[in-house]
Image (spheres, rainbow, N blue to C red):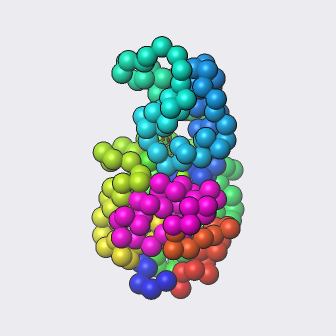
Amino acid sequence: MKNIRAVIFDLDGVLVFTDKYHYQAWKKVADRLGVPFDEEDNNRLRGVSREESLEIILEKYKGDPLSAEDKKKLTEEKNAIYVNLLSQMSREDVSRSVRRVLSDIRERGYKLAVGSSSKNAGLILEKTELKDAFDAVSDGNNITKSKPDPEVFLKGADMLCEAPEHCLVVEDAKAGILAGNAGGMYTAAIGDAVKSGKADYDMFSLSELLYLLD
Ligand code: B16
Ligand code: MG
């Protein structure tokens, strides 16, 4: 990989496994609405905003029409369940190998940022004591369009004062890989994103970054 100076990491599903909490929270909402929802359906919500996630779930909804107010209440309900699940998180929720990858890359002189669609990214970074591992955090609070729009990553690159072509995006979501590609960045897929076949690099484990980067 030529000329990479910065690495922008997705959060949910890459550094922490809060994707399982998103699933549990949406599952409760879906069950109440009578909508079938399994882990395969949940993969479509990776990297996608809270509101867009609800719209995806409602594709299979057969009940009475829902108003904008009803939808707002459903996203609030999901978030309350999710935040409650996050409250049990601690430093132990970030593996030693993830911390080692982040510190190794930083020691080699790369700048590091988080690029997450989540409005709860700050809370997760705080609970897991991960914030100091990064030079910048771009998240769901500073964007108007969520992945696959490149906004969250372009803002992250901007915060790091790096041009997109010098950035590598690490993602577990197809939407995130498409966002990185659309932003003119290199992309590395992990987990579910590998299936997309759209990334420049596919990884089985985050530690492969140590070999991918110079
Ligand atoms: P929130 P990421 C994304 O985080 C999740 O993958 C996605 O499932 C979620 O809907 C989105 O954040 C918004 O999260 O409801 O907490 O604002 O993968 O981009 O770090
Ligand atoms: Mg993710």
Q: Report the residue at 59% width, 38% height from top.
A: 22
Residue 84 in view (yes/no): no
Identify the residue shown where x is 33% and y is 62%.
154
Is 158 left, or right, of 10 in this rendering? Answer: left
Query: Is-magenta flag for residue 131?
Result: no
Q: Picture quarter containing residue 55? A: top left
- Residues in magenta? 170-198
Going by the picture, which residue comes out furthest to the top? 64
Q: Is residue 63 left or right of residue 157?
A: right
At a point 55% along the width and 29% down the height, the residue shown is 60
Q: Position of residue 211 (x, y in %)?
A: 62, 81
**Residue 5: horizontal and vertical position, in percent?**
42, 78
Q: Is 43 on the left or on the right of 181, as rendered?
A: right
Is residue 172 something one can see in this rendering? yes
Relative vertical location of residue 19 with respect to residue 181 in this rendering, above or below: above
Instruction: Return the x and y of residue 16 as percentages of the image width and height.
Output: 61, 52
Residue nearest the observer in this picture, 213 or 147: 147
Q: Classify residue 196 as left or right of residue 48.
A: right
